[in-house]
Amino acid sequence: MFKDKYVMGTCYYPEHWDRELWDSDIDRMLDCGISVIRIAEFAWNFFEPEEGVYTFDFFDDFLRLCEKKGMKVIMCTPTATPPAWLTGKYPEVLTSDIDGNKYKHGGRRHYNYNSETYRRFCSVITEKLALHYGDHKAVIGWQIDNEFNCELDEFYSEADTRAFRIFLKEKYKTIDELNRAWGTSFWNQTYNDFEEISVPARIPTAHNPHQMLDYHRFISGSVLSFCKLQSDILREHIRPGAFITTNGMFGYIDNHRMTGESLDVYTYDSYPSFAFGLKKESWVPKGLKDRHWSRNLTEVRSICPHFGIMEQQSGANGSVGGMEGPAPRPGQLTLWAMQSVAHGADYISFFRWRTACFGAEMYWHGILDHDNRDNRKISEVKSFHEKLQKINEICGSDFEAELAYLTDYDNEWDTADDIWHKDLNDVSSESIFLFTQKNHIPYDYVFFNDKTGAEDLLRYKYVIYPHPVLMDEKRTEVLYEYVRRGGILIVGAMSGAKDLRGHCVMKPGPGLLSKLTGSDVKESTFVHENDEGMTASDGKRVFDMPLYNEILTVKEGEENALKAAFYDSGYYKGEAALIENSVEKGKVYHLGGVFSEENLKTLSELIGMKSLTEDIAEVPEDIEAVLRSKGEKKYLFLLNYMFEPEFAVLKCEAEDLFTGERVSGRVEMKPFEVRVFKL
């Protein structure tokens, strides 16, 4: 985004405040190091107060002040909140619930991606803004819409049904091919014409899983089309060098493809305080609380290795509709912002400058509270900016990892409707994150797509593909080439069970992947309550085998595969739980179960997977360690999320970039403290 230096920003809403505050607000922002602000994502009415009437005076005045004072601006297209005159006159632009009831005006994100009427109005307002502000000296970038698929990620309007039919016609060409792909002979669901198909509606039973898989692919395509519609218009009119982005990371969006097609940089909205539940249990999985946001940031890094944070939490979160959360404690604002920096953010924009005095988010606190006085948060923002300047040389560096967590959107979206797949995937993905975090084994997400080749995987010594239930020949060949050339691949239960339509294959498990694994699944089962605590062993090590077990054997004719661990109890005692196969220079491990922290620890010992920081520092599991590199230079981030001091031991002398001191040996980490060392 900014490439050679870290930049700090905030989100500002001039339409919420008296004009008399603008001047002092910009001065105060600049004083604490804020040099970029995001504006106008919900301000359509200020540009088009009634249909076909355009006015720019309000934001012209504000941008004139920004230019005078040297404040840079990210301008937004305001399409996340259509104006009341539009939704009232053209109700077809509104999205609907699963029963077909249209949502009403009054909230946000109540529009419909596939409404031709709405797309026409969005095209016009985007073009008007681009023509008017495209050459403005203060405007350095553009954000498209705001948080695609936040609030809603499934859509059921008439326009969606029409667009879904077009999507299916383009994909399947004939209705007979669709019937085969969806397995419509089951439950007498056969269609005679595409016009008989609608988006999934409320039914008394489970939906057709193959229809749902295509429906989620369709939702992603709808978002991508809507984003590209605006991106194409912006590129025609904005000045060279101004970037295009969008923010968030929500369900049923191929963010990788969207970034490649429409964006220059991807930005994320980071709110680690969601991890601390108040009146209700937090939806964040238990384990590492706010540190759990590193998992999200890891996925963001797979989309865009050097990304931006468009909304970084600065105050208590909460809106009138719920989502209450505590304020960051002293030090946590810096900790969470540095968490983003450590994982690849070179732009940190705090949400928001001042807490709103009205509206649905008047309890969603910003840097300043309602009283508008300087406070500890603004002091911490200033301190964070000073720290950023001291580590500027790290900007543009690369995240270090030897392990890749391989996944793909087909398998991710399949878990929405395949409860077996979801149960296994949820346990394994969470366990992999917890194990790698606590043992300082960093990983990158890699999303399999049509362009992924063995070279993309060979950057990593190890690849774990936990439950690739949906598999095809092309992906199998890429994996085979990775292993053949020296890679180490790890897969779990249910691998290769389906094709890309979501049909279970009539082959012994792991289906197409048996070419790599050398294994044969004789039988599989969820662990019976009488068998809880199931384990397997190789004579030296014990593997925890919870939730779901496959009974494995070596595939007939395989000479390089061997049974590496055996179940210790139950009716399948003595049967294989782990198959190890050698494929030329590499190896494949097929674990007949889900991944847990315990069996990952055992497996890592077996295959020699170690912490990247092992030779650099002794780091307790309560501290996150991130290693970044830039040429020959290496940098170590240590982040203490705990409410008490922790201690690490540097095994070599290093420069503390915040203090300039040379340090080695035992170093103290105060509660919520971040330390950054140049090695």
Image (cartoon, rainbow, N blue to C red):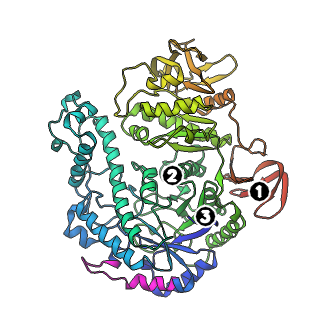
Reply yes or no: does residue 321 show up in magenta: no
The segment highlighted magenta reads: 47-66
Question: On the image, numbered disc 3 is attached to which residue?
Answer: 3
- When asked about the image quadrant of residue 502, the answer is top left
First-in-chain label (1 vs 3):
3
Query: Tag 1's secondary structure?
Result: strand
Q: Specify whether residue 547 is in view.
A: yes
Alpha carbon of mark 1 to alpha carbon of mark 2: how far? 27 Å
Question: On the image, numbered disc 1 is attached to which residue?
Answer: 678
Question: On the image, numbered disc 2 is attached to which residue?
Answer: 303
Vertical relation: 328 (above or below) 418: below
Query: Tag 2's secondary structure?
Result: helix
For the residues bearing labels 1 and 3, Cβ distance under 8 angstroms: no
Q: Residue at x 28, y 33 (%)?
A: 181
Viewer-nearest residue: 636 or 353? 636
The disc labelled 1 sits on which kind of residue? Lys
Sort mark 2 into few (<14), some (14-19) or many (20+) by Cα contacts within 10 Å.
many
Viewer-nearest residue: 302 or 311? 302
Q: Position of residue 218 (x, y in %)?
A: 32, 47
Sort mark 1 into few (<14), some (14-19) or many (20+) by Cα contacts within 10 Å.
many
Q: Position of residue 621 (x, y in %)?
A: 69, 43
Reply yes or no: does residue 65 show up in magenta: yes
Alpha carbon of mark 3 to alpha carbon of mark 2: how far? 16 Å
Q: Position of residue 137 (x, y in %)?
A: 50, 80
The disc labelled 2 sits on which kind of residue? Ile
The disc labelled 3 sits on which kind of residue? Lys
For the residues bearing labels 1 and 2, Cβ distance under 8 angstroms: no
